[in-house]
Amino acid sequence: MSEFRQWCIKENLTLNIHGIYCSCIANERDNLTLLKGVISSQNILQYEQYLNRIKAEFSLIRVLYYESKFTDSSKFDFESCYSELDDREIINIRSEKLRTCFRLCFSILDKLAIFLCQYFSLKIEKNTAFNNFWHQNKSALESKENFALIAINSLICDLNEKNGQFGFYKVWRNSLEHHILFLVPDTFKLSNDSTHTYVKMSDFENSLVNLIQFTRSSIFSTVFAILEDLRQKQPSDKENTMQITIHKKDFQHPN
């Protein structure tokens, strides 16, 4: 496997069910799918298309994070020609890749909320997002016997801004999207206010690794929730069902 793939396995960033508990060659590709071993009368090709989109964005996160760690961006930084203001902000292509990864994680989480609402025919509002879709559909979701939905609710609680273990991720995300978030050296004295947030680079990097892994867990839990529901609804007349085989896109393996 490539050095990049080996790194993904080591950092627990693959979308491969076998990779949850083993790091062998079976981890070579992100073969997470909704279609394997499922018999259904529903049109699940639409949901496999959603999963493709999520896998593509998660793949971009991994590449950007990997490049931020192991690729030299000094040439691009020189060409960008930032002003020296003695404000101690860490500003370069590497930090921008990290910031983009952070944004993309929340973009995926919000898409997963819509994904689940679409599949389970739940209410979707203009502001529906990962942190609130459960509350908007509480009775419908809690009436289901589905182990993976319980896991998703636990992940949502972890992101709660008031008392969640990772509530500060949401605060940082809001600052990135709607205000101004500066990444600064660890020696910088933080002075946050209502529109400016300062985060130490080491804190941001360490938290980002966890957020990417958190996003991976959310993707797995979403897929497992749908698979569990499909299994519960398998048609009794399996003899008259038609099997659909979906092949993987034909990207050439690098030599």
Image: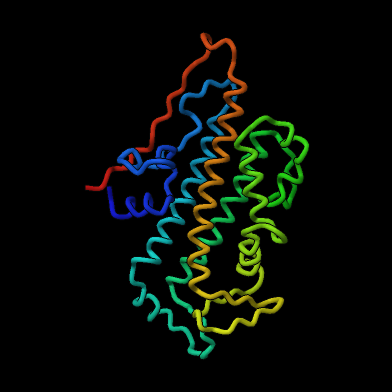
**Image point (28%, 43%), residue name:** 252
Query: What's the image's color scheme?
Result: rainbow
Which residue ends up furthest to the left in the rendered image?
255
Q: In this view, does 100 lie to the left or right of 21?
A: right
Q: In this view, does 161 lie to the left or right of 22?
A: right
- Viewer-proximal residue, 254 or 235? 235
User: Where's residue 54, x and y in %?
Assistant: 52, 46
- Viewer-proximal residue, 199 or 175? 199
- Viewer-proximal residue, 9 or 239? 9
Q: Is residue 80 above or below residue 49?
A: below
Q: Is residue 230 above or below residue 123?
A: above
User: Where's residue 112, x and y in %?
Assistant: 60, 45
**Image point (66%, 44%), residue name:** 153
Count the marks: how many? 0
- Viewer-proximal residue, 65 or 76? 65
**Image point (61%, 62%), residue name:** 169
User: Where's residue 115, x and y in %?
Assistant: 61, 41
Q: In this view, does 158 lie to the left or right of 17?
A: right
Q: In this view, does 182 lie above or below 172?
A: below
**Image point (27%, 43%), residue name:** 253
User: Where's residue 52, x and y in %?
Assistant: 48, 41
